[in-house]
Image (cartoon, rainbow, N blue to C red):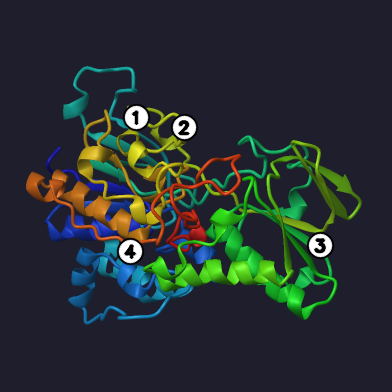
Amino acid sequence: MSELPVVVVGAGPQGLAAAAHLTERGLDVVVVERGGGAGAAVSEWGHVRLFSGWPELTDTAARRLLEQSGWTAPASGYPTGDEWVSGYLAPLADALGDRVLYDRTVTGIARQGRDKVVASGRKSTPFVVHTVDQDGRDRRILASAVIDASGTWSLPNPAGADGYPAAGEAVSSERISYRIPDDVSALAGSHVVVVGAGHSATHAVLRLSELARREPGTRVTWLLRRGSAANMFGGGAGDELPERAALGSRARKVIEAGVVEVVTGFRVAEFEQEGEAVTVIAENGHEISGVAHVFALTGFRPDTGILREVRIDLDGSLEAVAGIASEIDPNIHSCGSVGATGARQLAQPEQDLFIVGAKSYGRAPTFLALTGYEQVRSVVAHLAGDHEAAARNELVLPDTGVCGGAGGFDAEGSSCCAAPALLQIGARPVAVD
């Protein structure tokens, strides 16, 4: 076991940071990435500018590794996803060299020769990570430990308000997108709907509002499940991430200017085709008709299929790691009120298996890049036997300017004491840290 590497699933921000920490501590590591390069998921939303600045987007061990080759950390500015990849993630992967395997899809993780039912000898048996390469060949990697940093990007939530696709959602799939748009010029003069209340939805609304200002006849409708729009605009001057505050302020302005129509209490139940357009129908029968395109930006959820043969403990509602669920519940916490989580909270019933990064948060939309970097620092310290460092909290989060979560789902503008921050996973497209 001691001669086997730690396998990290995913060459995104947290996966590469974990590899940097493992390398720094003298532990062998193999990073398995299904994409063709570092930060493949980030590249898919490369046109989006993050609201976290460079100092919040790089990991300490990663910086130390990169600086050995003369790399200098950007001191300021707010990169796009593409700039984050080219300026940090790709150089970090290059520094890790052949420890990173690309075009390898992880299909399963297990204990060698034992399915999840078998209890005997599990702790002393290596993990086997099942992968498929770009030629479709099965490849297996034995590991002493596994860190799953594969994220949630591949599994966006549907538009349907009950967690399942709405009736007709699959049939109308050509008119529904689940990612932040880049070029929206083709939608000029049409009616466009955005579903969702997080940062991804806000980015989409702002991009579409620019189109509406330029192109007469363009109509933008923003559908919110909650009964009030009061919790959409963040902490304002109290937010220690200025670009996050600016995002909420810009959204407020386009709404107040009448460029964007907001409909609250709208829980999507059905899509009905009408020739070249669709009608979006709510659970209460409210209809929005003549819609050319819908951007369903309602968050993401973890794909735990690769973990079905190991023993894991996830929260029943958030699908987050059970040990951190109470600390990240969006009904209670905003981004700034979520504290650090480390190896102790992230521990699974399967010894030396850890789920980190956005995937550890399940459906909770309060994840920040800094949070993930602290997770992997603690987990790697634990795997290295440095339990004092693993237990230490080195995380300092920027405040959101609010003190709690999203408030009541049906209540008009309820919250603990102020308009809560926009809740959406960041440091990904949704992103925006």
Which kind of residue does numbered mark 3 sit on?
A: His
Q: Distance from label 4 to label 2 (Cα)?
A: 27 Å
Whether residue 215 is situated above or below residue 174 in the rendered picture: below
Distance between the Cα atoms at labels 3 and 4?
A: 37 Å
Task: Write down the residue under mark 1.
Answer: 313
Image quadrant in which the N terminus is located: top left
Q: Secondary structure at mark 3?
A: strand
Q: Marks 3 and 1, how far apart in space?
A: 44 Å
Mark 3, residue position: 191
Label 1, label 4: how far apart the Cα atoms are: 30 Å
Q: Position of residue 205 (x, y in %)?
A: 65, 65
Q: Residues within 10 Å of mark 4 (few under 14, many from 20)?
A: some
As rendered, which of 240 and 32 lies closer to the eye? 240
Please rate how many residues cluster around mark 2, counting C-alpha atoms within 10 Å: few if below 14, some from 14 to 19, many from 20.
Answer: few
Residue 19 visible to the viewer: yes
Percent of width and height locating residue 392:
14, 50
Q: Which mark is residue 138?
A: none
Circle 2 sits on which residue? 317
